[in-house]
Amino acid sequence: MRSQYGNDNVILSDIIKPSQEVLDNGPYIFADILDFKGLQKIVVNHRIDWLIHFSALLSAVGEQNVPLAVRVNIEGVHNVIELAKQYKLRIFVPSTIGAFGPDSPRNPTPNVTIQRPRTIYGVSKVHAELIGEYYYHKFGLDFRCLRFPGVISSDPPGGGTTDYAVAIFHEALRSGKYTCYLRPDTRLPMMYIEDCLRALLEFMRAPSEQLKRRVYNVTAMSFTPEELVDKLSKYVPNLHVTYKPDSRQSIADSWPQVFDDSDARSDWHWQHKYDLTNLVDFMVKDVQENYINVENGERHTLKI
């Protein structure tokens, strides 16, 4: 976004202290989504016209602290939706494969179907989809929402059910071993971070009249832990993976296995670039360069 709109026109915000790298990249400010007045001040002072709302407690973490998940994932959404209505902002709120539940068709999961999730994360995301659509129909709010699958990047895991597909790279490249908390045959939809961010930008830039709905499924691939291990073994030949399913298994079992994103592909021409083979190639390179080599005080590039 900064490369397209200029560094100073994209403001990053959080409640945590930024790294030097983040600070050097462009404007960074403190913003607490539970502080409505503080959010108003930011919109007015910086003349904001788009709001991209990524703040949430993820599925596994949310189950461990339901009251906090309700505050962040539900009250926080109320604040940003009301803010967007008040200041006529275009607002993006991400949703998830976790917005579906055990009663939803799993292979494939269409854009419009029954949604009865069993996690507070899923419940809060269905709520966000519905309140956003309501504000669109009632007040003309330019609300946009993508249901993302598991998103894979070299950043360390953040408390989601699909995190095994990130953690395995870190563990395998460090030690050659990984203990997976899902069964080897657990199929889930996934997407590489580059595709995720490009989907978001293309969707935000799509003319409103092109959008036949306000909430779309997007995905790139579906795979199981054993399929990922098979591809990763090319780089870690003696990789040893054990499977010890925990409470996250029941969450994964209630989620889509294959995501139908044909509406996104036809309405605003979504197309993914990364499949499982590309994803593994890039993840090995990313984790090796950004984490393993840095820990070892090295800076050489892994040849792929």
Image (cartoon, helix red, strand yellow):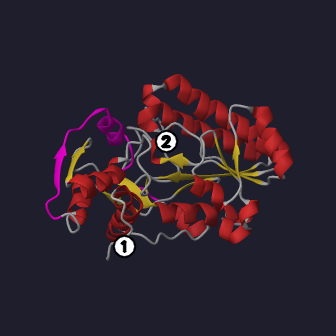
Numbered-mark total: 2
25 in the magenta segment? no
Gap in angstroms between the C-alphas marked 1 and 2: 39 Å
Give the position of the C terminus as an image quadrant.
Answer: bottom left
Q: Mark 1 points at which residue?
A: 301
What amino acid is labelled 2 in the image? Ala
**Residue 128: x percent and y percent?**
62, 39
**Residue 92: x percent and y percent?**
66, 51
| Above or below 292: residue 127 | above
Q: Is residue 109 left or right of residue 264?
A: left
Q: In this view, does 102 lie to the left or right of 267?
A: left
Q: Which residue is drawn at 37% across and 48% down?
A: 106
**Residue 182: x percent and y percent?**
26, 43
Characterize the local packing of mark 2: few (<14), some (14-19) or many (20 or more) Cα atoms within 10 angstroms.
many
Image disc number at residue 251: none
Q: Nearer the viewer, residue 20 or 73?
A: 20
- Can residue 204 be seen here? yes
Question: Which span of residues is magenta-colored?
Answer: 237-260
Q: Which residue is drawn at 32% across and 70% down?
A: 277
Give the quarter of the image for residue 34.
top right
Q: Name the residue under label 2.
A: 99
